[in-house]
Amino acid sequence: MTRLNKDKPSNVTASVRHRLLDIIRETGDDANLVWTRYAAERFLYRLCVSEYAEDFVLKGAMLFMAWTGRSHRPTVDIDFLGHGENSDKRLVQIFRAVCGVEVEDDGLIFDPDTIKVAPIREGQEYQGQRVMLTAFLGKARIPLQVDVGFGDVVTPEPRIIIYPTLLDFPAPRIRSYPHETVIAEKLQTVVVRGIANSRMKDFYDLYVLARDFAFDGETLTRAIGATFSRRRTEIPQEPPLALTEEFARDDVKSVQWTAFVRKSGIEQDVPQLLEVLSHLRQFLFPLLRATSGQAYVPKYWSPGGPWVFAESVPNIP
């Protein structure tokens, strides 16, 4: 079982603290975010070497951090798609087991007695559970939040990623969402929420994916169709309201976007909302038209676009 003596930190604990403090000084990153990221990484590692590794698929902010090497979230929470029963009892059982997995000493203790489970009620259409627990680095308490959703479909299959680590401990080898499912779920949210959408991070995430990654049109169209079908959402025949100029020019949305960009520290990374949504229309609307049968499936999107519709296109690695 994992050590539970928090009062006698090991030499490893002291070394980890010093190395994390060095990272904080060198990068200027928020100290709490660095502590939490480290604890989250080591929790992922414990999960991936446990008997429950196949029951969870990583998504959300931590997956974006692995893809881009940076975080634009004010917190570092873990988000999973879970498989199987979603009861409080089962999740407590799983998380207690993961806390107790034998691993190389990384200075952390995950206290199973701090585990609490509560339903997510933040406008979620599908039932989810929020698991709270505490990790200890010596006497320092590091709270962790793990959101587990259920019922969604992943298209194509989950991918195995080697999660990048802050320090030189074994890296988590964990199942994760493919880019295509992330786009499909965020697009579905954009369509459903319409003018009421205040989740500016979804627009930013979609923009970064379209700017930085290549896509096969057929695979991405399948992912959108599968997610919209699973969530019982009709494919729109016109550009969704939340991707239009009307939305971008709305005073409230403009304020929300500016606040999100400033709080996330990404002023140099993205243009104004009007330009972001223009780019997203070019990226997403051909996919919606293809999914609804209104148009041919686009073939290939290179990072930044535009779509290629010709038969001869580059291979995506």
Image (tube, helix red, strand yellow):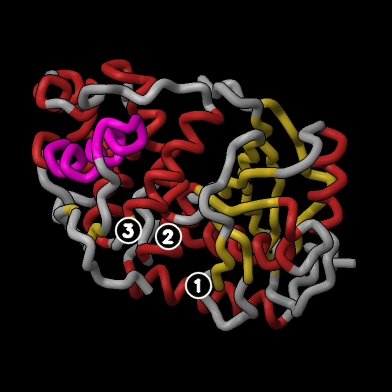
The tag earlier along the polypeptide, 2 or 3, is: 2
Q: Secondary structure at mark 1?
A: loop
Residue 292 lies in magenta, yes or no?
yes
The N terminus, quarter of image: bottom right
Q: Position of residue 42 (x, y in %)?
A: 65, 66
Residue type, label 1? Pro
Question: Measured from the top left, where is residue 121 in percent x and y?
Answer: 59, 21
Residue on which disc 3 sits = 215
Secondary structure mostly taken by the magenta-highlighted segment of the chain: helix
Question: Which class describes the residues within 10 Å of circle 1: few (<14), some (14-19), or many (20+)?
Answer: some
Decide: few, some or many residues near mark 2? Use Cα within 10 Å; few <14, some 14-19, many ≥20. some
In screen coordinates, is 212 left or right of 152?
left
Position of residue 24 relative to residue 97, above or below, is below
Tell me whether the residue at label 1 lies in contact with that at label 2, contact meaning CB atoms closer than 8 angstroms: yes
Give, as a single range, the part of the protein colored magenta.
Answer: 276-295
Name the foreground residue: 227 vs 75: 227
Residue 235 is left or right of residue 17, and the answer is left
Q: Which residue is mark 2?
A: 65
Q: Which residue is mark 1?
A: 164
Q: Residue at x 51, y 20 (%)?
A: 123
SS of the residue under disc 3: strand
* Residue 183 falls within the magenta-colored stretch: no
